[in-house]
Image (tube, rainbow, N blue to C red):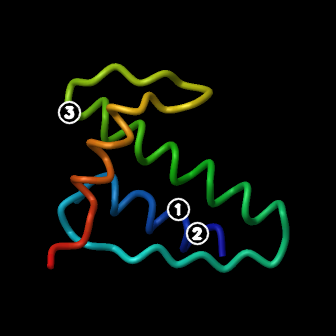
Amino acid sequence: MAVVADGIAECQAHWPTVPIVPIVLCGTKGLAEGWTYRHLAAARAWARAQGLEASDRGRIAAPIRQAWERATAPSE
């Protein structure tokens, strides 16, 4: 399961304009936390690739989060 989650997070970080519907299968709190950490790591990696400053820990700044959401939102 972790391999799949890592793959999804990595793909979303590398190709943020390709719509990827989050698939979250969390049977335990540990799996949910793991998915969250990978998702946040992907957002931070995307921000750094865009030349934005993103901290390694803690909350992601609102402007970065909003830019990430716009960039990864599915096209209609």
Give how far across and how far down residue 25 sits, in percent.
66, 80
Q: Which mark is residue 23?
A: none
Q: Quadrant of the N terminus?
A: bottom right
Which of the two discs, 3 and 2, labels the residue nearer the N terminus?
2
Q: Is residue 59 above or below residue 19?
A: above
Q: Give me the residue at 57% from left, 31% from top.
A: 59
Q: Which mark is residue 6?
A: 1
Q: Quadrant of the C terminus?
A: bottom left
Q: Give me the residue at 64% from left, 67% from top.
A: 2
Q: Is residue 14 above or below residue 60?
A: below
Compare residues 5 and 65 and report the one nearer the observer.
65
Q: Which mark is residue 50?
A: 3
Q: Give me the residue at 33% from left, 31% from top.
A: 63
Label 2 residue SS? helix
Pointer 2 residue: 3
Give how far across and how far down residue 19 sits, in percent.
26, 72
Q: Are marks 3 and 1 in contact (CB under 8 Å)?
A: no
**For the residue marked with disc 2, what is the amino acid?**
Val
Give how far across and how far down residue 51 sits, in percent.
21, 24
Q: Are marks 1 and 2 in contact (CB under 8 Å)?
A: yes
